Image (tube, grey):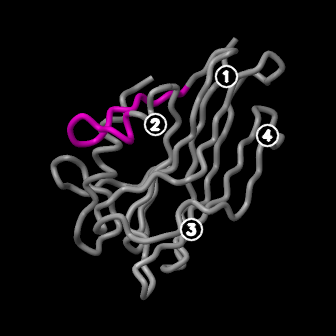
Amino acid sequence: MKCLALLLTLCLSLPASANDLWSGPDGQPLPDTASRQAKRGFSGALVITADRDWAMKWANPAEGAPAIAGATEVRRGGQLAVLVFFANPRLDAARKADVRCDIRVLRPDGSVSADQKNLVCYQGPALGDEHHTYLSAPVVKFTAEPADLAGPWTVSVTLRDGGRRVTLPLEAKFTLVD
């Protein structure tokens, strides 16, 4: 596990310019990764966490960005949450956003565990300026059951900003260990 406070700080400190890159605490742009993308001003990040208090931390950050621990492994009986963050959706004339996503979870053998299309991540009024980071409405909860396959699981999210007609492919993995 590693601390994702830095990642969430990055989410909360998107550049004000039209550049498509995430910026770090020092204001310098960061390159896209499989789980963090930006395009034409719209940004998204996929985070997997075993932190059972993530929702409370997100809703009530002590100072600045909440410190949510990331996870790359889970043991049988353990639980994970898959969180999708995004920022700067294009707003319509009524200052409302339309962000949707597809979520797919693949087992280690390549078979599909979950496949949901065109989910509403956020529809509604802007909650702040372009720096505001949103948590998408769908949160995938994973419990490692005794019958689940051990090995690497893949979570793929296709995040779409309807106003901008931009698609961000995001991917993260975790390993179920015995």
| Residue 160: numbered disc | 3
* Residues at marks 3 and 1, CA–CA distance in whole angstroms: 29 Å
- Looking at the rendered image, the quarter that the N terminus falls into is top left
The residue sitting at the bottom extreme is 93
Name the mark nearer the viewer: 3 or 2. Answer: 2
Mark 4 lies on a secondary structure that is strand
Q: Which residues are magenta?
A: 57-72
| Residue 55: numbered disc | 2
* Residues at marks 1 and 4, CA–CA distance in whole angstroms: 14 Å
Q: Quadrant of residue 153?
A: top right
x 81%, y 34%: residue: 109
* Residues at marks 3 and 2, CA–CA distance in whole angstroms: 23 Å
x 63%, y 18%: residue: 78
* Residues at marks 3 and 4, CA–CA distance in whole angstroms: 22 Å
Pointer 3 or 4: first along the chain: 4
Q: What is the magenta segment's predominant secondary structure?
A: loop
| Three-letter code for the amino acid on which mark 4 is drawn | Ser
- Tag 4 near tag 2, CB within 8 Å: no
Name the mark nearer the viewer: 3 or 1. Answer: 3
| Residue 113: numbered disc | 4
Left or right of 9 on screen, residue 3: right
The residue sitting at the top extreme is 178
Left or right of 162 on screen, residue 63: left
Position of 78 relative to 102 (above/below): above
**Residue denoted by label 1:** 176
Pointer 3 or 2: first along the chain: 2
Disc 1 residue crowd, few under 14, some 14–19, many 20+, Cα 10 Å: many
Count how many numbered circles sit on residues in the image.
4
Pointer 1 or 2: first along the chain: 2
| Three-letter code for the amino acid on which mark 3 is drawn | Arg
